[in-house]
Amino acid sequence: MVQALGVVVGVVVLTFLIARLIPGDPAVAYAGPRATAEQLAAVRERFGLDGSLWEQFVTYLSGVARGDLGSRSIPRRRWLKTFSECSQLRSFWSQSP
């Protein structure tokens, strides 16, 4: 039990760090290279990228604890809802004659 908890904590920390260590600015990747400074600031604020690394980690951790794994860029929907809809489609097609 303790080992499993350690693995989960390790995976959560590792995924957070990998996402933050990827070269480039996530705000530029989301808004595009021609985005203005105001647009980049808005993207950083929306996704919490304007906070300290610790604040970003706490936000990430609270989202993971709630099962909120983020949203897709296009369309702007919650990841879990999209996944559940895909699962429902697979169930539907597997029951079809």
Image: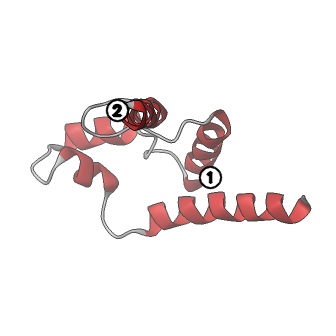
| Frontmost residue, 67 versus 28 | 67
Q: Which residue is mark 2?
A: 97
| Residue 18 placement (x, y as % from top left) | 50, 67
Residue 41 higher or lower than 7, as above or below? above
Which residue is found at the position 30% from the left and 49% from the top?
27
| Frontmost residue, 48 versus 18 | 18
Q: Which residue is mark 1?
A: 54
When asked about the image quadrant of residue 72, the answer is top left
| Residue 28 placement (x, y as % from top left) | 24, 53
When asked about the image quadrant of residue 3, the answer is bottom right
- Residue type at mark 2 is Pro
- Residue type at mark 1 is Trp
What is the CA distance from the residue labelled 2 to the residue labelled 1?
53 Å
| Residue 65 placement (x, y as % from top left) | 68, 39
Which residue is found at the position 42% from the left and 32% from the top?
95
Which residue is found at the position 54% from the left and 51% from the top?
52
| Residue 42 placement (x, y as % from top left) | 30, 35
Q: Is residue 7 left or right of residue 17?
A: right
Mark 1 crowdedness (10 Å alpha carbons): few <14, some 14-19, many ≥20: few
Mark 2 crowdedness (10 Å alpha carbons): few <14, some 14-19, many ≥20: few
Helix, strand or loop status at disc 2: loop
Residue furthest front in the image: 97
Helix, strand or loop status at disc 1: helix
Task: Report the quarter where the N terminus lies.
Answer: bottom right
Q: Earlier in the sequence, mark 2 or mark 1?
A: 1
